[in-house]
Image (cartoon, helix red, strand yellow):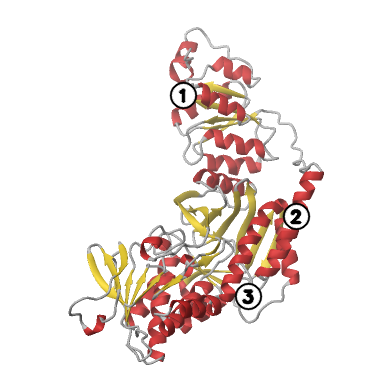
Amino acid sequence: MSEAGVVQVNRLAVIGGGVAAMASAVAAIATARARGKALEVTVFEGHRPDAKAVPALLTPECRSRLAALGCRIPPDWHTRELRGVEIVAGGQSELFAGPSGGIWVLDGWPNGESGQRILSSALAEVAAQHGARIIPRAVDRLTREPASGTVAPGVRNATLLVRARGAGERFHATILAEGPGAGSGPALFKGYRGPPTLPAVQARLRYAGRPQEASTLRLLLNPLPGVDGLFLLPCATSVFALAYGPSVEPADFCQAVMGAARDGFLDEGFEMAELEGTRAPCGVGRAITGRGQLAVGAAALGHPFQIGVADTLAGASRAAHALIEAMDEPAVLRRRYVTEGLSDLVEDARAVSIAQRWLRRAGPKAAQALVRARRRSAAVAPFSGGVLGLPSPAPLALLGSARWAGLRQTVRSVLAPTFEPLPTMIPALEQPLFYVVDDDPDARGALTDLLEASGAKVVAFADELALYCAVARRPPTAILLDVVLNWVDGLTLCEGLKRHPLTRNTEVVVMSGLSRPHIRHRALEAGAKAFLSKPIDPERLLALLDLPALAAPAGEASAVGASSYESSA
């Protein structure tokens, strides 16, 4: 203990296993050495929640900050280089050129590690080389207990007791570096409240080894009600997709992805993998500092337009400086870390989070709002000073532009009806075309045989993803839709089809083996022309679709009925 009564930091626990945690460990060791202080760092990495299948985007600023931490990323590590970001909203597309030096996509999935894991592993290696202890245990709880009795010199005045799987260790300070929305924060940090978050869903769209040719990150704004944005990031042989919004669930995510495929923003032939729910930070946390404690990365602040890890690395370095200098003085620590250290990041997070809500109101005018904000922003050189890893627009300029666009769209929707452009007229088909969507191969085959025998052309799909790709090329006469599908239930899918201008006039017939009144009612509410119970009555189906009835010889009708079309009446 010094003469001023301030405890000198010599044992630090970092809680978390991602990029923010490892960068905080490296920065803390480097800062302590620069000030001539001995520091022991232990990283409790737990299950590394942010590294499962998420790629890493490295802007020039990210690469510079990594180099400053002693972590150099070889050029051959990145799978591709992005030339910019394409913003899509309301049928309009705007391409924002990337920063000088390009944006690297770091990723090895599915044959190797994901980009986030590659990056956190590289930082962990640097931390270990500097003497940090990295253990795989997750922290159960943290309490503040004054030392009693005889204690080792290295843990004198270490009042923070960290318990991980039954084992307890004492530390002078802790850094909370878990992912967004982590539920253990309040148990580890008295008074802590993480930043507001939005529900999000992420997945990999796999292309069976076929390399991706896209060279831009796409952001589709307001693709569906309740979905504020859908990111589509091309990797080596896959696309990483993430949707966020106030009510995003896996079904909404799948519908947004299928809509993107239908509108030509995704190549055909992908399958979905690694689908999981997550949270997207959207603001600044409360009480992110305490006596010897602080939060970094997504546990402290963030916003949906934050790509790359530059802000995370900057926050980790500033946290290390503040903690080493003012660990045991809560007021000073807060001033050094939040008021002085994170002032620009806090301002950006708040501005973009508010702008996000206005972009939601702007609807189809959201892309124009970003264009106007870019024109009003002065590019910051040599690194990114804006959002989405771009030199511009600046967050405050985006806030002003998004607010104006949101207000104009709100007034327009109140004072005047909205008119959507009609889809291009498609010539009448000589032969009626029907799409059949059912995950049961026997049911698909039987329906196909029946409709083709009546002179129709039929395309059958085992899943709804293939359906959306086909609809983008050629809308059918009608769609026969099963309720139980792989990713999205048929009722939700029917609602989406009837909402989109391209398919709103296409007849949809919903089928189900569960002939229950509430399912029938939901199908008709979703816009279905009819609801048919399985097994399907062939005569009723053909009459419903205005197809000629089959004149089957005696004996064959019973055979057909005995397969998949026998009436349940």
Q: In this view, does 248 lie to the left or right of 397?
A: left
Seen as rendered, the residue at the extreme left is 150
Residue 407's tag is 2
Question: Which callout, 3 or 1, points at the residue further toward the start of the chain?
Answer: 3
* Residue 446 visible, this angle: yes
Q: Is residue 123 left or right of residue 390?
A: left
- Residue that mark 1 sits on: 514
Query: In the figure, 134 relative to 237: above or below?
Result: below
Q: Rounded to the nearest whole Å, what is the CA distance between mark 3 and mark 2? A: 26 Å
Contact (Cβ within 8 Å) of mark 3 with mark 2: no
Q: Which amino acid does label 3 sit on?
A: Gly
Q: Which amino acid does label 2 sit on?
A: Leu
| x and y percentages locating residue 271 in the rendered image | 48, 48
Quadrant hosting residue 176: bottom left
Residue 45's tag is none
For mark 1, give the secondary structure: loop
> Disc 3 or disc 2, which is closer to the eye?
2
In this rendering, the count of numbered labels is 3
- Residue that mark 3 sits on: 385
Residue at (52, 43) in percent of width and height: 251
| x and y percentages locating residue 287 in the rendered image | 47, 67
> Disc 3 or disc 1, which is closer to the eye?
3
**Label 1 neighbour load within 10 Å: few <14, some 14-19, many 20+:** few
Q: Please state which of residues 467 and 504 is positioned toward the viewer in this rendering.
A: 504
Query: In the figure, 488 relative to 98: above or below?
Result: above
